[in-house]
């Protein structure tokens, strides 16, 4: 017996289209077990990769540098915990689908200083 499940109801239509190399600010909510409240977190960075773009499990990776520490965070695009995604700009001349060279560039800059 085949049961057809309509996944279209789970897709987010209120978020912008993203490309590799976009500078974004992802605003998410995370539940804090200590205070039993939701905390709102702002994460600004550059999108370095995207996976399974037109499916329900669409993920994108955001890279940021904070106090000479490189942070790479993976977000699920269709997650209900994402409040908002704001596009802040774009890196010029992006010719790759995955910008792993940015990670190496930031790490080498950190260790050479």
Image (cartoon, rainbow, N blue to C red):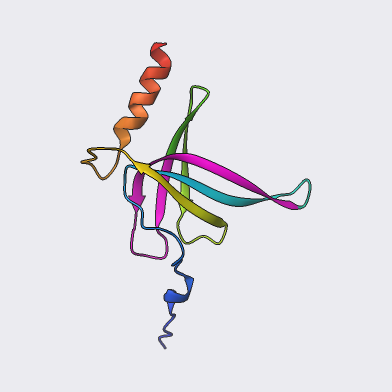
Height in image: 4 above or below 90?
A: below
Q: x, y (%) of residue 48?
A: 35, 41
Q: Which residues are magenta?
A: 37-62
Residue farthest to the right? 35
Does the magenta portion include 51? Answer: yes
Number of labelled discs? 0
Q: Could you tell me which residue is drawn at 42 percent across and 18 percent down?
A: 110
Residue 97 appears in which quarter of the rendering? top left
Q: x, y (%) of residue 75?
A: 47, 50
Does the magenta portion include 16? Answer: no
Q: Could you tell me which residue is drawn at 64 percent across and 50 percent down?
A: 30
User: Quick one: 87 or 80, which is closer to the camera?
Assistant: 87
Height in image: 53 above or below 111?
A: below
Main SS, magenta region, reads strand
- Left or right of 63 on screen, residue 94: left
> Where does the C terminus fall, quadrant-wise?
top left
Q: x, y (%) of residue 49?
A: 34, 45
Q: x, y (%) of residue 99?
A: 30, 38
Height in image: 25 above or below 113?
A: below
Height in image: 78 above or below 45?
A: below
């Amino acid at each position: 017996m085949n049961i057809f499940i309509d996944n279209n109801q789970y897709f987010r239509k209120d978020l912008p289209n993203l490309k590799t190399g976009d500078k974004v600010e992802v605003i998410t909510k995370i539940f804090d077990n200590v205070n039993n409240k939701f905390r709102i977190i702002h994460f600004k960075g550059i999108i370095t990769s995207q996976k399974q773009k037109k499916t329900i499990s669409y993920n994108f990776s955001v890279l940021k540098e904070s106090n000479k520490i490189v942070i790479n965070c993976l977000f699920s695009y269709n997650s209900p915990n994402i409040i908002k995604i704001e596009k802040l700009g774009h890196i010029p001349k992006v010719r790759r689908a995955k910008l792993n060279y940015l990670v190496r560039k930031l790490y080498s800059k950190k260790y050479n200083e």
